[in-house]
Image: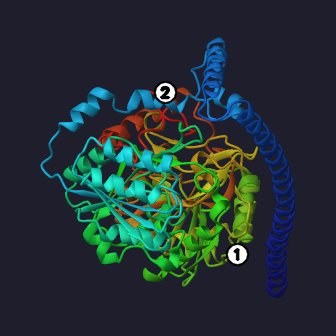
Amino acid sequence: MASVSEAAQSSADDSAHALIAAQRRIAQLEHALAKRSEQLHQTHHRLMTLNRRMTVALHKRLLLKLRDKLMPPRTRRRAIAKRLLRVAIRSACYLAGRPMPPLRDWQDFAATIEKKPYHLWIDRFEPKRAELDRQRHATFAVSPLISIVVPTYNTPLTYLEAMVDSVRQQTYSNWELCLADGGSTLPGLRERLTELANHDPRIKVMLLEKNAGIVGNSNAAIGQATGEFVAMLDHDDTLAPFALYEIVSAINQVPDADVLYSDEDKLDSEGDRCEPLFKPDWSPETLRSLNYICHLFVLKRSLLLQLGGFRSAFNGAQDYDLILRATEKAKRIIHIPKVLYHWRMHSNSTAQNPESKQYAFEAGKRALADHLHRLKVAGTVLDGPLPGLYHIDYALVQRPLVTVIIPNKDQVHFLRGAMASLFEATYANYEVIIVENGSKDPATWDYYATLEREPHIRILKWDKPFNYAAVNNFAVTHARGELLLFLNNDVRSISPTWLENLVKQAIQPGIGAVGAKLYFEDDTIQHAGVVLGIGGLAGHTHVHFPRQAPGYANRLWYAQNYGCVTAACLMMPRQVFEKVGGFDEGYILAFNDVDLCVQVIEHHFRIVWTPDVELYHFESKTRGPEDTEEKVARFQREFNLFHLKWGEFLAKGDPYFNPNLRLDRTDCLPRME
């Protein structure tokens, strides 16, 4: 009888293993089918986008040619036509009950009707004449000389005059302008440079015999600098009149600052300001995805000399290379959330035509690779989805054990999807802890029995009332892994590399948590990072944006630092989890992940969100919606608890979300109040 029983048990075990193997195979086939479908969808989307861009570009060229022929630039006829069009738009806005948008280009008319205009933001938040006058008479405890370095080469005289005028109009007067011209052949340029130097002792000009390139010309300009700080300015761009005042004000507030940068915008062909770029505070992982610092960039001259200035090996991306090296050495990096720099758009500028200098983006890849080499970080720099965006494929120099923690109550069909995501993952060194909390469905228990036959899967029972924080803390005490992955039971991966990509980010030095890109069932954004302050406490950005959308400043397309990510899919080193004290069990269901992330930031670790980890999130399928009186009361209690604990932190603002962006929306529009 014993042998029969053993044979039966063996047969049952074989059947169970065969079932799991079949489930894995089904999951792999489903994934392959989904991947093919996604590839087809993306190809169709690219074709449609390309066709649309070609049509728009053709129409734009024809319209611009017609416009320039009928109304040449800087003519009275052109000015009158522009005013008439503004009146027409203003009338349409009035009838539609919307504010007046800026006129940026003819084909942008319909789009601008839907947006609050940037020029209203400028009028509301930038200093008026009285404030500029006050700044001119202000005194500082520390008033350092600021050297503004500008390389020139065949600079159009109108651009040169605008650049120099913007420096002369600075409300802070302790500056010097250091220009180096690389043998320009443009008639009148070198003569004008000489005149400028003769008429203003603060302007220094070096006339080189031949063009030394952007790097050589820039280093020659730097060689003339005597200021304590050096500011970088391109020959065709301009500074806001209060730029240096804000730089010096920040230096006085943070005396050990040795690198400073600001927000920026662009100047269109009419000289109108547009496309503001409101940046985060110092964000190392963001800088590895793109040169987000760019303009205005200021650093101590002593640091600049220590670094050896610009390097010719990175011509075209010499500024990115310098910024990477400077931020590696800097003691304090300060972001000034004000638009201090205006980047001119024209056909030869990457501000308007990124592909005009493709070599610059290749140089950027080399600069980033050199940065990784200096820091002894193993990884390969790859092109991102757009010129100037980069993706680092970090090497898995080690494959630490990952403990995946999944709280669950019934909803076995969702749990199967979450488990299938793990079964098909390319990263195999993981264990799973499912914390069972009151399931009633027999199918759930049958599935548990099947899963428990796998040696790396355990089912732990939680018999107390549900408390998300307590459940996860309990599971961690049973975890064996170096990395912890908190995973909802209602997620489903899109690519088998998702777990591997999480690990690659989580093992990098200084990283405290990593979050994923999550979608609703309709392929719109559910989670692309959490901003502290949205909705009064914390909220997701870009909610319901289409899956392929770039988002504000292309932020949906590259890895970057955030103040918080959702625990629906959150990986963190166990050491970090234990150092910050785990989840605060005062938060039964809401804000526990936000609280955990704030603890991570307060302990000087960084949080990364990456679009290279994509999953569907069938939100709140286990616990259900927060729609009962009891749940609403609990939510309010936890909301109040968070404010009591972190009110001071919230008041300072999310360091990775610019204060010029709205907190009452998720689409990153400029604030108007």
The quadrant in which residue 391 appears is bottom right
Q: Position of 585 compared to 613: left or right? A: left
- Asked if disc 1 and disc 2 are in contact, CB closer than 8 Å, the reply is no
Above/below status of 423 relative to 344? below
Q: CA distance from mark 1 to mark 2?
A: 50 Å
Q: Is residue 603 visible?
A: no
Q: Secondary structure at mark 2?
A: helix
* Picture coordinates of residue 316, whole percent (x, y): 54, 69
- Looking at the image, which is closer to me, 479 or 373? 373
The quadrant in which residue 268 appears is top right
Could you say which disc has been placed on residue 178 in the image? none
Q: How many marks?
A: 2
User: Tag 2: Cα neighbours inside 10 Å, few (<14), some, or many (≥20)?
Assistant: some
Q: Is residue 380 visible?
A: yes
* Picture coordinates of residue 184, whole percent (x, y): 50, 64
Q: Secondary structure at mark 1?
A: loop
Residue indicated by mark 1:
426
The amino acid at mark 1 is Thr
Find the residue positioned furthest to the left.
141
Residue indicated by mark 2:
120
User: Tag 1: Cα neighbours inside 10 Å, few (<14), some, or many (≥20)?
Assistant: some
Q: Position of 13 compared to 640: left or right? A: right
Indicate which label's residue lies in the foreground, 1 or 2.
Answer: 2
Q: Position of 340 compared to 68: left or right? A: left
Above/below status of 217 relative to 59? below
